[in-house]
Image (cartoon, helix red, strand yellow):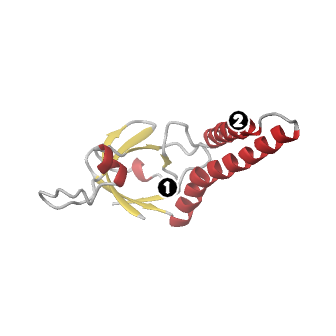
Amino acid sequence: MIKLARIQQINTDNVVLKLEDKAQCVDCKSHCADGFLGFLFHKKNHAELMVGLSQKPSMNCHLVDKNSFFTGSNKVNDLVGLNFSESQLFKLALVLYGLPIILMIASLIMGYWLFAMLHLQADIGGVLGLVFGLLLSKYLINKNQVRYKPQVKFFK
């Protein structure tokens, strides 16, 4: 997947990129270029990415510049291309969307079963299991946030 972005800010340890808006027709009323939720709630996505210039990942950076692309003659407002790996984006989506669903369903079933075995209200056990699965998935995703960064190739 290829995206275009403009350099907003260049610092010593990071670069801030703003993704270019999708092209839309002049006087368009159907909002084809917007996402469904953006259309529904009339929200504009600013789509800013922070690229870390150091080789080790940081918690506040979305991407890491492993090929030292931004150490060259890049200036503010330069147009930069980003080439995302499709397979890695699929794996990230699986972790961010699939892991919570699997954990919530599994912990719901385990909570329901455990409370039923203890002769307690099984529905309450299911709800507690669901909440536990949600909190566990949030913890696991936030714990591993530094490791799961998509590999991006930058180009002009």
Label 2: few (<14), some or many (≥20) within 10 Å?
A: some
Q: Is residue 108 left or right of residue 59?
A: right
Of residues 55 and 136, the one nearer the viewer is 136
The answer to whether residue 94 is above or below residue 110 is below
The secondary element bearing badge 1 is classed as loop
The percent coordinates of residue 77 (x first, y second) are: 25, 47
Of residues 129 and 124, the one nearer the viewer is 124
The percent coordinates of residue 46 (x first, y second) are: 32, 43
Q: Which residue is mark 1?
A: 67
Of residues 61 and 95, the one nearer the viewer is 95
Residue at image coords 77%, 39%: 122
Asked if one can make out residue 6 in the rendered structure from this viewpoint, the answer is: no
Is the C terminus in the top left, top right, bottom left or bottom right quadrant?
A: bottom left
Label 1: few (<14), some or many (≥20) within 10 Å?
A: few
Of residues 105 and 144, the one nearer the viewer is 105
Furthest-left residue in view? 27
The percent coordinates of residue 86 (x first, y second) are: 51, 65
The secondary element bearing badge 2 is classed as helix
Residue at image coords 87%, 41%: 117
- Mark 1 to mark 2 CA distance (whole Å): 46 Å
- For the residue marked with disc 1, what is the amino acid? Asn
Q: Is residue 19 left or right of residue 135?
A: left
Is the N terminus in the top left, top right, bottom left or bottom right quadrant?
A: bottom left
- For the residue marked with disc 2, what is the amino acid? Leu
Residue at image coords 70%, 37%: 132
The answer to whether residue 66 is above or below residue 16 is below
The answer to whether residue 94 is above or below residue 141 is below
Q: Which residue is mark 2?
A: 128
Dot 1 or dot 2, earlier in sequence:
1
The percent coordinates of residue 35 (x first, y second) are: 34, 54
